[in-house]
Image (cartoon, rainbow, N blue to C red):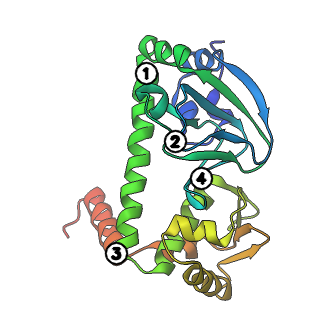
Amino acid sequence: MGNFDASSLTAPGTLLARLNGPTAAALLALGVEQPAPAGHVLMREGARESYVVIVRHGVAKVTGGPTVLLSIRVEGDLIGEMSALSGSPRCATVTMAGPGVVRVIANREFAPFLTAHADAAVALAAVACDRLHRSNRRCVDFSAYPVRTRLARVLTELAEVHGRRLGESAVEVGVRLTQPELASLCGVADASIHQALRELRDARVVSTRYGRITVWDLAALRAQAETPSTSRRARREAASESGAAV
């Protein structure tokens, strides 16, 4: 048990990846692990339920309303903790994007686990802070930046978090996404995302086929995602680290 390494089985930044071996093993000893076929609804918006779900294998999509894709959850992610801990209704629907395995844990087990493992409670708070930070950044993107920049930022994040290396510079995004789902993540109309994708394809930065997105030049995509303000901040940080004046 003491040699259990959750980080080797999960995506970086997820709850399991943040836990030390004994704490991760204690969490995974709770609840029941079960297969989850593609399209299986893990939790439904508006429902009052008192369990959490850990994605062990596979990818899940978080949606609001009938069609708006809000985010993606991957191996090692915890889902549903807000409703389980607060007793409030579910604020989104979570559906498996493909076949996978999940562990379902009732709150009567999960809440005492957090009380007994302060490091897990701190890690869960850190995950919540990261998600809030990404949400706030996306809200700024929606109001301040053009569609191509927003799309490049979303694709960069998807490639870095959910990507599978195909070579030195190519990455395949590990989850199928339709153009309407990409439009939801970017906060734009379908027609706008279609135009921005075409520009990136014409520049040979990305390609798309049947919901699969391949990033052929991640460095170029990162450059597309960069804005004047982020460029200035990066230069300031680099100068600060080197001791140079700006």
Q: Which mark is residue 119?
A: 1
What residue do we see at 36% from left, 57% from top? 136
Q: Which mark is residue 161?
A: 4
Q: Secondary structure at mark 1?
A: helix
Left or right: residue 160 compared with residue 112 = right
Point out residue 30 in the picture as x, y percentages from the top left corner.
63, 16
Instruction: Identify the disc placed on residue 144.
Output: 3
Location of the C terminus (image quadrant)? bottom left
Mark 1 in CB contact with mark 3 (< 8 angstroms): no
- The image shows residue 91, relative to residue 56, as above or below, that is below
Q: Residue 7: x, y in percent?
A: 61, 33
Q: Earlier in the sequence, mark 3 or mark 4?
A: 3
Between the residue at mark 1 and the residue at mark 3, the CA separation in whole angstroms equals 37 Å
Q: CA distance from mark 4 to mark 2?
A: 29 Å
Q: Secondary structure at mark 3?
A: helix
**Residue at disc 2, secondary structure:** loop
Count residues near mark 1 (Cα–Cα under 10 Å), then give few for <14, some for 14-19, many for 20+. Answer: some
Q: Nearer the viewer, mark 3 or mark 4?
A: 3
Residue depicted at 62% across the width and 36% down the height: 76
Q: Position of residue 128 (x, y in %)?
A: 42, 39
Name which residue type carries label 4. Answer: Val
